[in-house]
Image: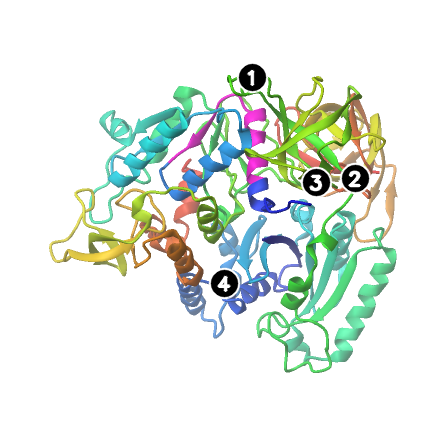
Amino acid sequence: MKDTSYINPLENEAIYIFREVAAQFEKPVLLFSGGKDSITLVRLAQKAFWPAKIPFPLMHIDTGHNFPETIAFRDKLVKELGLELIVRNVQDSIDAGKVKEESGKYSSRNALQTTTLLDAIEEFKFDACIGGARRDEEKARAKERIFSVRDDFGQWDEKNQRPELFDMLNGQIELGQNVRVFPISNWTELDVWSYIEKEGIEIPSIYFAHKRKVFLRDGLIWSHSDYVFQEEDEEVLERMVRFRTVGDMSCTAAVFSEATDIESVVQEIRDSTISERGARIDDKRSEAAMEKRKQQGYF
Amino acid sequence: MEVLKIATAGSVDDGKSTLIGRILYDTKSLTTDKLEAIEKTSKQKGYDYLDFSLATDGLVAEREQGITIDVAHIYFSTATKSYIIADTPGHVEYTRNMVTGASTSQAAIILIDARKGVIEQTNRHFFINNLLRVKDVIVAINKMDLVDFSEEKYNAIKADFEVLMGKRDYQDQNITFIPVSALKGDNVVNKSEKMPWYEGETLLEHLEGLDMAAVSNVGTPRFPVQYVIRPKTEEFHDFRGFAGKVYGGELNVGDEVVALPSQTKSKIKDIYFYDKKHQTASRRSSVTITLEDEINVSRGDMLVKVGDLPKIEKEFTATISWMDAQKLAAGNKYVIQHGVNKVLAKVTTIHHKINPDYSGVEEGVSALGMNDIAQVSFKLNKPIFYDAFKDHRTNGSFILIDTQSNNTVGAGFIN
């Protein structure tokens, strides 16, 4: 009897990409944020190399403003799978005077991550950085390649990208350049959630509805926290919320939700009429916010 | 779940972005915040309709100039299928993007402005989709609202296009004509009330009805080895798995295979997908294969079935689509990436340039410039294991890499 139950074109494509990375590069690293997309990447990498271990380390660029639940989850996952984890801190870049903390109502450390990331790439001489970005997230990302070449300054030259034909991925680079690799480029938010459900992948608790102290600003639900600037007239409320996307606390807004398990989360995403990045405060800054950050080396 | 990839081609102002925006809108794939952004910008520009093209044009320069520069990927799904649209720009200078978009697609939409009919650009769009052997082509005759939904006009354009079809190389391509108005929404997702004379499917109905097996490229099974998995743990001490993707057909446990280039024979022992064993490795699945015998196989090698060998040659001729500002000339050396295998190649002869508008060939050409398409012969430092592109879309194609810049500078389809 023919068994075709495992045929998921997106999963097969991602596994293929992981294997190309391992074969074409000397020092790859998986950029791990503790979010659902990077957790999905870890599962796909396991599948690509089984029964061998994942042949590269994970790296977390820690803003210091993460949800504590994410950090606890990260450490547990790394331990369980016997993976190597590198952590580099935005706080160190601030202390060294390389970047300046933003101030004011909308201050966030999200954009500051770029400097810390580029320094870490240089420190470890990584030639490929695997990330969980998807093309459906945002307009500039829709034009991103699977193997995206960055220059010495980590910059994205959107008008001069290598064409990607058929399945062929060209990872040839010069010394000093690096490639950002996006194995789940072609997945949608719903694809990721459905995969998490089907595979029974564990994810941090903040993705499920929970009671949290929040406040409302500009139609978004912000976390009440030491890391988030709050006006005196912005009232703290306790509400059932969950997060659809997880960056750090200063750039991620919550959604009202009663979905406490994976089935109901998937159903909620299916019915949703608001895009995932609609809850990303960092993208709301301007029409071209993401494009600008990517040109500067943001991942 | 099935995933259908679609390439789009149309000239500037044919309304390609509007068509894609319309598909997203009518399939309820646009989220509230995206719709609000479109409404806001449309209003700012003083339009009295929704400018759906804003749903796809992403880069700042594109919005400033109102054009599409680069291939953008757009996603939507219905209850039956997931769709990925490669939105490729239609200007003459962007042939390379069209070739790129078509290379991964099983279907293509060619847009024609009903007021202009078949123009030189249309020839190019059709030529490229035919060259790349995209199985299903939809000719969407757009802006029917601007020609009073005229059946005569539609029939005249269709007849002009049928003349082109007579010249095509790949005759098995399915071609469907649909009269649409992307702006007004006629025959895109919903049937038009203005064109009762058209009894065929709407654009989306056509895509929904496509049988994935029928639009996929089937050939003979080829297994290029990407990576050798050697865990060297106690439990898997002797495990040597060959990781790769199966192309063309399927492989089964027990199949007698030949490893190329060594030509050593063995049998498939196990097929793994992750930690589970399977009897069959289906087309396009990323599996790990172990063999009965310990033979030397490494990245770039290929496993094929006994008695079903590809060509193993150090010289070949191919149709080239050149994509770089630096010219290709006889004597130039490049890296050829054929699947996951890389070899050094030298251009021996440029036979002739092919005009991609069906106006014939140009002899006596000494160099190729950006967007040129030509017949070129190569000599390699090592043999590659290939099939003709017409028999095997994956194993008959390659990319050319510049040895200095490392850029992908061309694509080839082997004769």
In 3D space, how far apart are the residues under numbered discs 4 and 2 (Cα atoms)?
Answer: 38 Å
The answer to whether residue B166 is above or below residue B231 is: below
Q: Which residues are magenta?
A: A13-32
In 3D space, how far apart are the residues under numbered discs 1 and 3 (Cα atoms)?
Answer: 51 Å
The chain holding disc 2 is B
Secondary structure character of the magenta stretch overall? helix
In 3D space, how far apart are the residues under numbered discs 3 and 2 (Cα atoms)?
Answer: 33 Å
The chain holding disc 3 is B
Q: Are marks 3 and 2 on the same chain?
A: yes
> How many numbered marks, from 0 up?
4
Mark 4 or mark 3: whose residue is earlier in sequence = 4
The kind of residue on which mark 4 rests is: Ser
Residue carrying label 2: B220
Circle 1 sits in a helix, a strand or a loop, which is it? loop
Q: Of the residues tagged 4 and 2, which is closer to the observer?
A: 2
Q: Can residue B123 be seen in the rendering of this structure?
A: yes
Residue carrying label 1: B237
In 3D space, how far apart are the residues under numbered discs 1 and 2 (Cα atoms)?
Answer: 33 Å
Q: Of the residues tagged 4 and 3, which is closer to the observer?
A: 4
Left or right for A249, reference A11: left
The chain holding disc 1 is B
Mark 3 or mark 2: whose residue is earlier in sequence = 2
Q: Residue at x 59, y 65 (%)?
A: B19
The answer to whether residue A191 is above or below residue B321 is: below
How crowded pointer 4 is (Cα within 10 Å; few <14, some 14-19, many 20+) is rated as some
Q: Are marks 1 and 4 on the same chain?
A: yes
Residue carrying label 4: B29
Q: Is residue A20 covered in magenta?
A: yes
How crowded pointer 3 is (Cα within 10 Å; few <14, some 14-19, many 20+) is rated as some
